Amino acid sequence: MPSHPPDHRGKRQRAAGRLCHPPPRRRVSNPASPYIVFENVEVRYSPLVRGLCGATLRIERGEFVFFVGRTGAGKSTLLKLLTREAAPTSGKVTLAGIDLGRLREREIPALRRQMGIIPQDFALLPRKRVWENVAYAMRAVGATRKEVRRRVPAILEQVNIGHRADAFPHQLSGGEQQRVAIARALINDPPLLLADEPTGNLDPEHSLEIMQILARLNERGTTVLVASHDVLTVAKVNRRIVTVEGGQVTSDSKSEAPARV
Amino acid sequence: MFDRLEFLFGEATMALRRNVLMALAAITTVAVSLFLIGGLGYVYFRIDEYARTLPGKQEMRVFLRSGAPYAQITETAKQIRAMPGVASAVWMPKEKVWEKERLQHPDLTEGIENPYPDAFKVTLSDLSSAGKVAGAIRAMPAVEPAGGVVYLEKELEFIDQAMRVVRWLGSVFGSLLFVTGGVLIYNAIRLTILSRRVEVRIMQLVGATRLTIRAPFVIEGIVQGALGGALAALMVLASHQVFARFIESLKADVTSPPFPLGLALAGLSLAGATYGLLCSVVAVRSPMRLQ
C-alpha cells in the first residue's frame, strides 16, 4: 500500500487539520482496521424512498474503488454518507474509526476538510479564472493570500491544468473543467478523494484522462472512491469495482464473489 | 486575522453588489421605519420640551370668589394639588399681587383700589389633562364661576393634538414599516444566498466553517441596517429643520436648539445595524443547513 505524501500544508491548515480530529473518547482509529466501513447501512430519504437498504462494505487506506450501478442504485448515497450529506437511518458508517452517523452538524466542516469532493457538475464559479476558483476555495478554508500564491500553481500542475490558469471556465473543455474541480478538491491535501460521476458529462477520451489523473493521485497514497455508471471507462482503469443495485452491494471485484448483505 | 476579515468583507461586498435593488429597498424601508419611530419620537420630545419652556403655556390662573374664607382657600389648594396632571398650585394673595403691580407700575395704579381677587397659579405636569383639570377646578365652590379659570386653552389643545398625532404616526406606521423593513432585509439576504448558491456549495464542499459561510450574509444585513439608520438620521435632521422653522414662525423670540446629528447618526445606525443583524441571522439559519 502506498504511503501518505509529505504534508505540504501551511501551519494554519495543519493546525486546522489537528482540530478536525474528534475528541479522544471517540477516536478508535487503528491502522490495522479498515479505513472505511459501511456496516449494514440503511438510508431512507422518506418513508417511500430508500437510498440504501443494508449495504455492507470495507475499504482499506490507499484503495481505488469504483461504485457502479444504475441511476438510483445507491452509489451516490454511499459517497453522501461519507461527506455527511446523508446520515444512516440504521447501521453504521465509520471513517478512520470515526462513527459518521454520530457526528454533530458543527463537526461536518472539519470532516470535509479531511476529504476532497468532486461533484458531477464541476461547480465552478463562472466569473472567476481557473486559479481564482482554486484560490477562492482555499481562502474559504482559511488560507492566507501568501499560502494561496504559493500553493495554487502546484495544485494546478498536479492535474495538468497549470497552462490554463488564467482562463475562465467557459473557455475550458469539459475535461479541463473537471480537472479544475479535482484541483479544488486537492486544496486540503486530502487522504480521501470522493468523485460522484466525474465523467458523467465527458466524452470517452476526456473520461479516461480524468480517470488517469485520479489513478495518479491514488498512486501517491490518496484513497479514491468514484461513483460511476460509465462501465467502459471503469473497465479500462482496472481497479476494485463494487456493484450497487437496489440499495445493496451485490458484487465486489475484490472478493470475487457477491457481497454478503 | 486581517486576511480572514478581508475575505469575509470581500464576500459581503460581493453579496451586496449582487442584489443592489433589493438591498436599496431594504435600506430605504429600514430608514423610513427608523425615521418614523426614532425621528417622530425625537419630534415628540421636542414639542413637549417646547411646551414646557414657553412661559405660561403650561400654567393656568384660578381666581377665587371675593371673600372666600381662608379654610376654604386652603381646602381648594389641597384638592388642586392632589389632581392628576397638576405639578404645583401656588396661592397668590391679592394684596401681594397688587403690591407687586404698584411697584412695577406706580403711575397706573395710583388712586385705584385693588381690583385683583385672590388666585392660584397652577402649573401642569401633563398637557393632555389641562381640560379635565380646568373643568374640575371650575366646579369648586371657592372658585369664581365666570372666568374663574384662565389658561391658554387653544394653544394647549393644539400642542396636545400635535403630540397625539406624532405618537400615533410613530407607533403605528413606524411599527408596520419596521416589520416590513425586517422582512425586506430577510428577503434580500435569502435572494443573495440563492444567487450565491454555487459559492455556498463550494465552501461547504471544501469544509469551510459555518461562520465563514454565514458571516458575509450577516455582514450584509448589518450594513443594510446601518445604512438605513444613517439615512433615517438625515431624514430626522431634515424634519427637525422644518419643525424648527415652523416653531420660529409661530413665535419670533424662540430659537430651537441645534440638532444632535452625531448622536442621531450613531444611535440610529446602531439601532439599524442591530436590527439588520437579527434579520440576517434569521435569514441564514434555514437555507444554510449543510446539505
Image (cartoon, coloured by chain):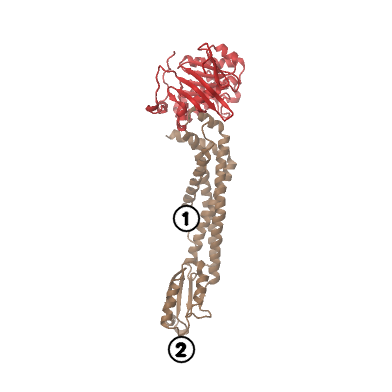
Chain colours: A red, B brown
Badge 1 amino acid: Pro
Could you tell me how far apart the alpha carbons at marks 2 and 1 are, in whole angstroms?
55 Å
| Mark 2: few/some/many CA within 10 Å (<14, 14-19, 20+) | few
Name the spot of residue B116 as percent of width and height, x first: 47, 82
In front: B56, or A85? A85
**Relative vertical location of residue B88 with respect to residue A236 in this rendering, above or below:** below
Return the chain for callout 1: B
Q: Are marks 2 and 1 on the same chain?
A: yes
Name the spot of residue A227 as percent of width and height, x first: 55, 20
Callouts 2 and 1 close, C-beta under 8 Å: no
Instruction: Indicate the secondary structure of the residue bearing disc 1.
Output: loop
Q: Which residue is mark 2?
A: B111
Sequence-first disc among 2 and 1 = 2
Name the spot of residue A108 as percent of width and height, x first: 47, 29
Q: Is residue A91 visible?
A: yes
| Mark 1: few/some/many CA within 10 Å (<14, 14-19, 20+) | few
Name the spot of residue A158 as percent of width and height, x first: 50, 18
In front: A102, or A63? A102
Badge 2 amino acid: Gly
Q: Is residue B255 visible?
A: no
Instruction: Indicate the secondary structure of the residue bearing disc 2.
Output: loop
Return the chain for callout 2: B
Q: Classify the position of the N terminus of chain A by image quarter.
A: top left
Q: Which residue is mark 1?
A: B260
**Rendered residue at 47%/50% (across/down):** B266
**Residue at far right of view:** A203
**Residue at far left of view:** A24
